[in-house]
Image: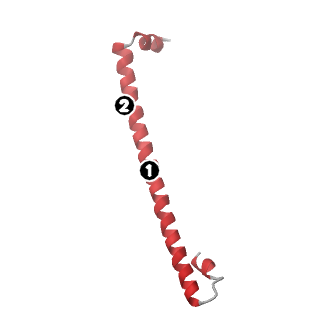
């Protein structure tokens, strides 16, 4: 990628500048991509945990506190 970006440069300084720019852009993209993957994994783990807690609360409510829940469970 660096060579492709630097290829159209008019002089060595411009090639060097474009190579640094491409390197920084790649690094920034990698960091953002890594953060997105981390956030997605964290969200998925939290969502699974919330679903488990919700199932437990739902089971408790259906069995002890909510006759509609017990009725729905029997249907």
Where residue 42 sits: x, y (%)? 41, 47
Check disc 2 and report the residue beneath it.
53
Check disc 1 and report the residue beneath it.
39
Label 1 vs label 2: CA separation?
Answer: 21 Å
Residue appearing at x 45%, y 15% in the figure: 73
SS category of the residue bearing label 2: helix
Q: Quadrant of the N terminus?
A: bottom right
13 or 69: which is nearer to us? 13
37 or 23: which is nearer to us? 23
Label 1 neighbourhood size at 10 Å, few (<14), some (14-19), many (20+)?
A: few
Residue appearing at x 47%, y 48% in the figure: 40
Residue 65 occupies which quadrant of the picture? top left
Q: Is residue 27 above or below residue 65?
A: below
Q: Is residue 6 above or below residue 38?
A: below
Residue appearing at x 49%, y 72% in the figure: 24
Using residue 49 as the reference point, say whether residue 30 is left or right of it.
right
Badge nearest the viewer, 1 or 2: 1
Residue 50 occupies which quadrant of the picture? top left
């Amino acid at each position: 990628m660096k060579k492709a970006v630097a290829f159209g440069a008019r002089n060595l300084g411009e090639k060097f500048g474009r190579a640094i720019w491409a390197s920084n852009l790649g690094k920034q993209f990698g960091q953002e991509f890594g953060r997105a993957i981390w956030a997605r994994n964290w969200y998925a783990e939290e969502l699974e945990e919330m679903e488990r807690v919700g199932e437990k609360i739902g089971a408790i409510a259906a069995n002890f506190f909510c006759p509609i829940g017990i009725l729905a469970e029997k249907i």
